[in-house]
Structures are given as structure tokens and as C-alpha cells.
Amino acid sequence: MLGSTGVYVSVVSLGTMTFGGAGTTLGDALGGLDLRAAESVVGQALDLGVNLIDTADVYSGGESEELLGTALGARRDDVILATKFSARTGTGPNQIGASRLHLMRALEDSLRRLKTDHIDLYQLHSIDPVTPIEETLAALDDAVRQGKVRYVGCSNLAAWHMMKAQAASERHGWTRFVASQSYYSLLGRDVEQEIVPMALDQNLSLLVWAPLAGGILSGKYGRSGADEPGARRAAADYPDFPPVDPHSAWDVVDVLRSVANRHGVSPAQVALAWVLSRPAVTSVVVGAKRPDQLADSVGAADLVLSAQDMADLGKVSDPGRSYPQWVWDFAGGGRVPE
């Protein structure tokens, strides 16, 4: 369920950073899929029961949205279509951010590229330290009232940013965020400190990006490097994104492979199943270059990890309690909600 909306979304959703960008370093590393390949991926995703597809105006300079819009064609209404705004889309001083000016322009451009008259989930891609959140929320509310947007969400915001936004929306009667798209994986558990508790309290859905930590948890990599030719993180100029601690990553991968062997599945399925089991998580956003990758990812929805699996994975990936959580543990006296 997407927050408290009554809208059902698939637990595995399709991300489209692999669409477009051929001939660029990042685009080729991610996939660089052309229209024919994008149509194949979208068709397979829909046939597998995926009904949430996510993109952004900045992916491949807008080409991702264009390819997705064409690939969906007559099946547009079969999906919850999500895109994002606020990243830089041009060289001008106002071609970035979350101002009303840029937001409205970005929305119209996304609608045109996606070949649709509305966005189902329109997401603030990151915090804009210049624009007051009230300006952004008022503009998003206008877009909803105009019928160009159904629901609004955010991505890469801190918990306090989201609470400030929810309070402003409540105060003014504006549409509220229903979801946060956040990074979460066995190698990146920061969201557990503040964002997950906030999401549970506010009934916000967590849509997880990079649940495989940029491919590290896919099973393609080991301590000696990439096991699969062409793996994107094997490229010398590929950025460390999301950043991974090399001192702990391979211990996690070792346990991940051990759990995968117990179940006879891929490490990627285990990594995805672990994220899906976590509180507040509604869906994991996965990309794909090939049909077998997408089929494997969707298969994670049916994988049930045992208590031993969860204990093994939790222990090896445990980041420890940060302040003030460790004080709460010390002073809590065993008090927990019933």
C-alpha cells in the first residue's frame, strides 16, 4: 500500500536509470538501453506483475522519461507512474531546485516526455536549501488540484525535513507526502536511525533505491573484484555510488552468499528479500539490463528468510547504535509500546 492512499503497489518496482544515455560513461555503465530494449524490459515487468515504474527528469538528460513514455504506450494506465524533479536540467540558474518556477516547468516537461496528462507520484528528488519548503508544497498542491499529479512524495530528505513538510501541509491543508524514496541496503542502514521511525509514525511508504548497493550485493563481485565481465562497478571511472565501506562490505557479501546457498537462490534475491522484510518498506526499486536480471529480482518477493538468516545478515551488517539511540537503550528501562 502506498502510504495511507488505498493504492496498491508491487513490492518490487522498476527503476529506469538503465534507459538511455548510450555513449556516456555513466549511461553505458548503467545500461544505455535503447527503445527496443526498454520496451522489452517494461513489457516483461508488467507481465511479472510489477505495477510501479520510477524515473526522473534528470536520468539520461530526460531520455529515460522519453523512452519510458513510448514503451508504455497503450499500457500507461496499467502502472503507477512515478518521476522526480529538482535536479539540474540545464545550465541556467533556475533550471534546478524546488522553486515554483522550476517545479512547474519541470512538471510540464516530464508530462510531455512521458506522453501522459498526469503523474501518479511526483517526487521532490532532493532537498533544495534555497527554496522554502512551503513554496514547494504549495506548488505541488496546485499541481494536484489541477489534475496533473495524483500523489506527491520525496527522495533523499532527512527525517526532520519530512516532518517539517508534513507539518506545513497539515497546517495549510495541502496535499501531504505519501512516500519517501530512500537508500537502504545491507551496506547502508542509516535510514533505520531516524527515517524508518518517522515513516512508521507518519504512515509514509519507504520506496527503496539501490537495495543492492549499486550492484555490490548482486553476487557479481567478490574480494578480488568483479566476477562478471562488464559489471558497472568494475569500471575504473565509475563513481563509488552509493558509497560502500570496503572494510565491511565483503564480510556482508560472504554471509549473503552463504544464505543464498542455503536457499538455492541468488545473493541478489536474498539482499532484496532482507530489505523487503524491514519495517516501513513498501517496495524496492530495481533496474535491469537483461530479462534474467529482472526476473531474478521479482523472485525476491516470494523468498522468505528464516530467523537464522535474518540473525546472520543482521549481525554482519549491524552499523551499531548512534547517538542518541544508545542513550535511549541505556536509559529506557525496558519500556516498549504494547
Image (spheres, rainbow, N blue to C red):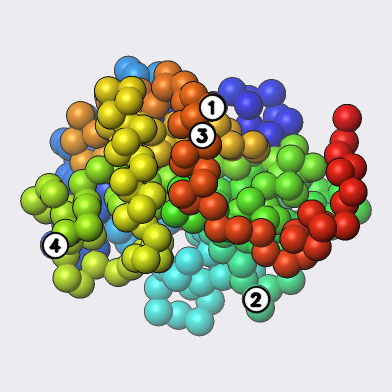
Tell me the crowding category of disc 2: few under 14, some 14 to 19, or many 20 or more residues within 10 angstroms, Cα based: few
Q: Quadrant of the N terminus?
A: top right
Name the outermost residue toward the left.
Answer: 229
Which residue is disc 2 drawn over?
129
The residue lying toward the viewer, choosing from 274 and 109, is: 274
Residue 8 is at least partly visible in this image: yes
Which residue is disc 3 drawn over?
310
- Which of the 4 quarters of the picture holds residue 237? bottom left
Mark closer to the chain start, 4 or 2 = 4
Going by the numbered disc 1, the residue's amino acid type is Ala
Mark in the foreground, 4 or 3: 3
Picture coordinates of residue 129 (x, y %)? 65, 76
Quick check: 303 above or below 127?
Answer: above
Mark 4 and mark 3: span between their CA atoms? Answer: 41 Å
Mark 2 and mark 3: span between their CA atoms? Answer: 38 Å
Mark 3 and mark 1: span between their CA atoms? Answer: 5 Å
Which residue is disc 1 drawn over?
307
Which residue is disc 4 drawn over?
23
Picture coordinates of residue 51 (x, y %)? 45, 26
The residue lying toward the viewer, choosing from 182 and 52, is: 182
The residue lying toward the viewer, choosing from 181 and 170, is: 181
Q: Quadrant of the C terminus?
A: top right
Q: Is residue 200 left or right of residue 7?
A: right
Secondary structure of residue under mark 2: loop
Going by the numbered disc 3, the residue's amino acid type is Met
3 and 1 marks in contact (CB < 8 Å): yes
Secondary structure of residue under mark 4: loop
Mark closer to the chain start, 4 or 1 = 4
Tell me the crowding category of disc 4: few under 14, some 14 to 19, or many 20 or more residues within 10 angstroms, Cα based: few
